Image (cartoon, rainbow, N blue to C red):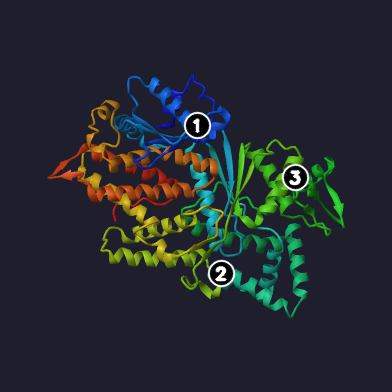
Amino acid sequence: MDLKNIVLDGLKGTEFEKSGIEKLLVCNSGVDKGEISLPCFALAKELHKSPIAIAEEIKKSIEEADKSNQFFEKIDTINGYINFFVKKDFVIKQVQKEVIPNPEIFGATNIGEGKTVFFDYSSPNMAKYLHIGHLKTTFIGDILKKIYSFLGFKTVGINYIGDYGLPFGKMIVAYKHWGKDSEIKKKGIDAIQDLYVKFHKEETDNPELMAEAQEWSKKIEEKDPEALRIYNWFIDISKKEAEKIYKLLDVSFDSWRGESYYTDKMDPVIKELSDRKILITSEGAKGVDLSEYGMGFCLIKRSDGVSLYATRDLAAVEDRYQNYHFDKGIYVTDVAQKLHFQQWFKCVDLMKKPYAGKLQHVAYGRYSLTTGKIASRMGKQALIIDLYNGIYQKALEIVKEKGYSYNIEEVAAKITRGALRYETVKTEIIKDSIFNPDSAMSFEGESSPYMQYTYARCCSILNKCGGLSEKITGKEIDALDTTDLSDDTSFSIIKQINEFPNVIRDVYNRTEPFLLTQYLISLCSLFNKYYNSTRIIENGIVNNSRAQLVKMIKIVLTNGLNLLGIPLIEKM
């Protein structure tokens, strides 16, 4: 229920109806300023009246519209501000009716009905490790995909893998000189990476190795049987290794179509740019001059004829449009690639493509570890598998220390997955952030284990209550007594629950998952204070109204944590 609509309905037919008041209304989480506040200062210039006078007039209009005193307990005006106190009984009943009968869809809307959105995220280079740098793109993309699906969109998750270019020529050269099939079969991606490192060490004293690598890279493009045999073998090993890690992280994709797929699909892009007379030649290279837009020169083809990322991205997005007829495309990469996306998005505009203006780059800040907290194998950059295993062992120790005896390995795995996810979206995504294993594993304060523990507490309470069906009828809700939910603490929770759909909408509008994590942490804090001060079961008797409140909290936590991909734990 959007409480703002009560105010807006009361202003219909008045001079304030189209004055932009909707954008000025603020929902309050506390109780001292009512449920809704309206600062009238921004209206003064438009209406040529003082904020104090405007506040009094709006108050009068609302009171006349609510003559039966159905909605508002009182309306206060203070120095140009209006505070609306909505009747608690009305709010409680409306929230109960929206949440309890349809738990699975509370917070969802159908704004995406009939629309398709693709998400390009994670996108690791094959034959290399997945490291901490891949966590943000992977989790942010996965979370946004879940939220769009929740809002009714048809979603497509694309893992645009790096499976093209000179690195694979280097690996083949290293394999030919120093590789052993038995070692690769035994060690997999570790052996391939060792060969890659070996190439760069040897190249210093043997520069001819680079010429060999270029030749083998060319052979891959020309589909030489031996080159493809080795290349496909390395790609297959890499994919299987990546899939194991994605399974640990509970991430999946609808497509793994990578760069190599577009090797024979770039010429039509170059031709179209040329036909539209926006492709120019500069020092032997071809590109699009975007200097008038402040974007420099977008290189499409190097002077040696080699294509670039922009060329492949233009070919890829055309292919995706033909396959999915998308209404929007979202690319999740670090902020360092901002100019790259600006450039080729502008090329799409200049090419007058039907998807021009429908592409979005979601840029995030750097992500790193606190020094010395997690040791990675062989001194390499922090690998996801090492990070996961380190956190899992820590979670296992905590679970054992706390005396848990129920599926401790499964619980530890869920805690690990939740901690890794939460830490990537606990602040605005553009901010640089540091993963601290100690705070990530805390069961108090702002952390994933804290939310999982709160959810488990809700489950425990409801199990003790017994007999509470997941869904009850409207008549049963009407029969619930709201007296025990009218205190300030309970009512603050009711208002917080009511905000869940608005939070989901804001995450969608602002592309900021941290809004959801902040909201859920706040809800958990309110509930735990409530739990410590309120009896839900007393002398063996269940207070049904309070039990239903716990059930509503559980519903919101279920939907919210599912959207974040944080696993639910029923017993802790």
- Label 2 sits on what residue type? Gln
Find numbered disc 3 in the image and state the secondary structure of the residue it sits on: helix
Which of 460 and 499 lies nearest the eye of the viewer?
Answer: 499
Please name the residue that numbered disc 3 is placed on: 347
- Label 3 sits on what residue type? Cys
Residue at 55% over, 27% down: 47
Earlier-in-chain disc, 1 versus 2 = 1
Please name the residue that numbered disc 2 is placed on: 381
Residue 116 picture location, percent across and down: 58, 37
Considering the image in quadrants, where does the C terminus appear?
Answer: bottom left
Observer able to see residue 152: no
Badge 1: residue crowd in 10 Å (few <14, some 14–19, many ≥20):
some
Find numbered disc 1 in the image and state the secondary structure of the residue it sits on: helix
Considering the image in quadrants, where does the N terminus appear?
Answer: top left
Of the two numbered discs 1 and 2 in the rendering, the one whose residue sits closer to the viewer: 1
Residue at 54% over, 45% down: 511
Query: Mark 1 and mark 2: span between their CA atoms?
Result: 49 Å
Residue 536, above or below 385: above
Query: Mark 1 and mark 3: span between their CA atoms?
Result: 38 Å
